[in-house]
Amino acid sequence: MNAVSLEQMLRETRWGASLSAEQLERVASESAAALVPAGGYVCRSGEPVDAWIGVLDGMVKMMISTQSGRASTFTSIPAGGWFGEGSLLKTEPRRYDVVALRESRIARVPRRTFEWLLNTSIPFNRFLLVQLNERLGQFIGMLESQRLHDPDARVARCVAGLFNTILYPGIDKKLEVSQEEIGYLAGISRQRVNQALHALEAAGLLKVEYGAIVINDLDGLRHYGS
C-alpha cells in the first residue's frame, strides 16, 4: 500500500477527519500498512509497544493465553477499529495477543507519531478520551454478561457489542462474521452459538445469513435477557 492510499484511508477515520491536512500528511508518511493472513499474529503479548494499531479491513481478536495452552478472548475488532492506546500511554509491554480471524489489512502509527498527535492535536485527545471511555464500558458489559447471563443472552450481547458505532465507525446493519468467531468472543461452542442465533432470529432480533448476521433490533439485542 502506498502513502497516498493509506492517507485516504486514514482521512476516512473519525480521528483522521479531525486533523489538518498537514497533520494527516505527516501521520500517513510515518505510518505503514500490511496484510496479516488469517490466524497470523498482529502483535504478541510481552513485546514492546511501538505503534498504535488500526484494522483497515478484516477482523482481529484480542486474547490472552496461559503457559498451559488455555486461551481467553477479550473482544474482536472489526474494520474501522483502533487499539493499543492504553499500552502506549502506560509505556508497558503488551499484555495480550492480537490474532487475525481472517485476512486483515493492518495500519501501524508509530509511537513517536502517536505522541506527536497527543502534543499537537486537541481533537485527537478528545477522540482518545471517548475511545478509552467506550472501551471501558465495553469490557464492563462483557464481564456482566459472562457472570450473569445464559448463553443466548451472551451471544445477543456479543453480537450487539460488535455494532458499536463509536469504537467501530462505519459499520452497518450487516456484519460478516462466522459462528465460530462469535463462539471465540462469547466463550461458548460454535454449536451453542448456532442454537442461540436461531433463538434470536425467531425472536425477530436478527437474521442469520451464510457467514453474516443482519441486525433487525440492536436495542433488543443489547437488553436481551434483562
Image (cartoon, helix red, strand yellow):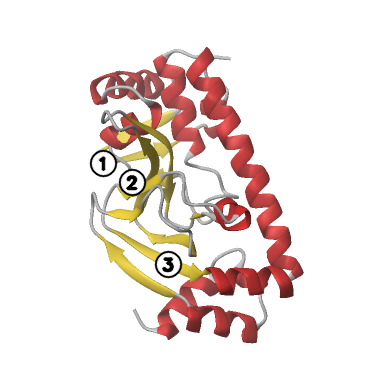
The residue positioned 65% from the left and 74% from the top of the image is 116
Instruction: Give the CA separation, mark 1 to mark 3.
Output: 25 Å
Instruction: Give the CA separation, mark 3 to mark 2.
Output: 21 Å
Q: Which three-letter amino acid code belongs to the residue tagged 3?
A: Ala
Q: Which three-letter amino acid code belongs to the residue tagged 2?
A: Glu
Q: Are marks 1 and 2 in contact (CB under 8 Å)?
A: yes
Of helix, strand and loop, which one carries label 3?
strand
Mark 2 lies on residue: 176
For marks 3 and 2, give the one nearer the viewer.
Answer: 3
For marks 1 and 3, give the one nearer the viewer.
Answer: 3
Q: Nearer the viewer, residue 69 or 165?
A: 69
Packing grade of label 3 (10 A; few <14, some 14-19, many >=20) is many
Mark 3 lies on residue: 107
The residue positioned 58% from the left and 56% from the top of the image is 91
The first of marks 1 and 2 along the sequence is 2
- State the mark number for residue 211: 1
The first of marks 3 and 2 along the sequence is 3
- When the figure is inspected, residue 130 is found, relative to residue 72, above or below; the finding is below
The first of marks 1 and 3 along the sequence is 3
Q: Which three-letter amino acid code belongs to the residue tagged 1?
A: Gly
